[in-house]
């Protein structure tokens, strides 16, 4: 008989107050930026991996970038 491996699922999503990190149904953190939230999930997933457990990551939404940043606009130096 084989034992079923239980996987932890991490969810990173924007809220009214910042970026929320949930593990299953439990909230494990609230961060100012998406990058901070993802760094924390990376650390938590590393701890789980060290114990031989599997995990998945789901990210909803995206960080808009620093103030004044426009994804559609090319830099002056782009074609030089």
Image (cartoon, grey):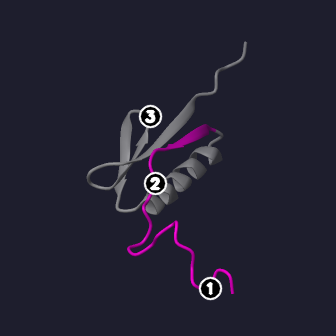
Q: Quadrant of residue 2?
A: top right
- Does 47 sit above or below residue 11? below
Residue beneath the point at 73% across and 12% down: 1
Label 1 or label 3, whichever lies nearer to me, is 1
Viewer-closest of 79 and 60: 79
Q: In which quarter of the image is residue 57?
A: top right
Viewer-closest of 5 and 79: 79
Q: Residue most toward the top?
A: 1
Local SS, label 1? loop
For label 3, the residue is 24
Viewer-closest of 19 and 29: 19
Asked whether 70 falls inside the magenta stretch, the response is yes
Local SS, label 3? loop
Q: Earlier in the sequence, mark 1 or mark 3?
A: 3
- Does 20 sit above or below residue 33? above
The CA span between labels 1 and 3 is 45 Å
- Does 6 sit above or below residue 22? above
Residues at discs 2 and 1 in contact (Cβ within 8 Å): no
The CA span between labels 2 and 1 is 26 Å
Q: Residue 38 carries which label?
A: none
Q: Which of marks 2 and 3 is nearer the N terminus?
A: 3
Q: How crowded is mark 1: few (under 14 residues within 10 Å), some or many (20 or more)?
A: few
Label 2 or label 1, whichever lies nearer to me, is 1
Please provide percent x and percent y for residue 60. Answer: 46, 44
For label 2, the residue is 62
Which region of the structure is painted magenta? 53-80
Number of numbered discs visible in the structure rendering: 3
Q: Residue most toward the left?
A: 16
Residue beneath the point at 32% across and 56% down: 18
> With 42 as the anchor, is 37 left or right in this view?
left
């Amino acid at each position: 008989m084989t034992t079923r491996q239980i996987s932890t699922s991490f969810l990173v999503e924007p809220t009214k107050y910042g970026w929320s990190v949930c593990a299953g149904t439990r909230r494990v953190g609230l961060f100012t930026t998406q990058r901070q939230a993802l760094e924390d999930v990376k650390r938590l997933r590393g701890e789980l991996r060290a114990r031989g457990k599997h995990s998945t990551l789901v990210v909803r939404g995206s960080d808009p970038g620093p103030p004044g940043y426009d994804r559609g606009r090319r830099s002056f130096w782009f074609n030089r």
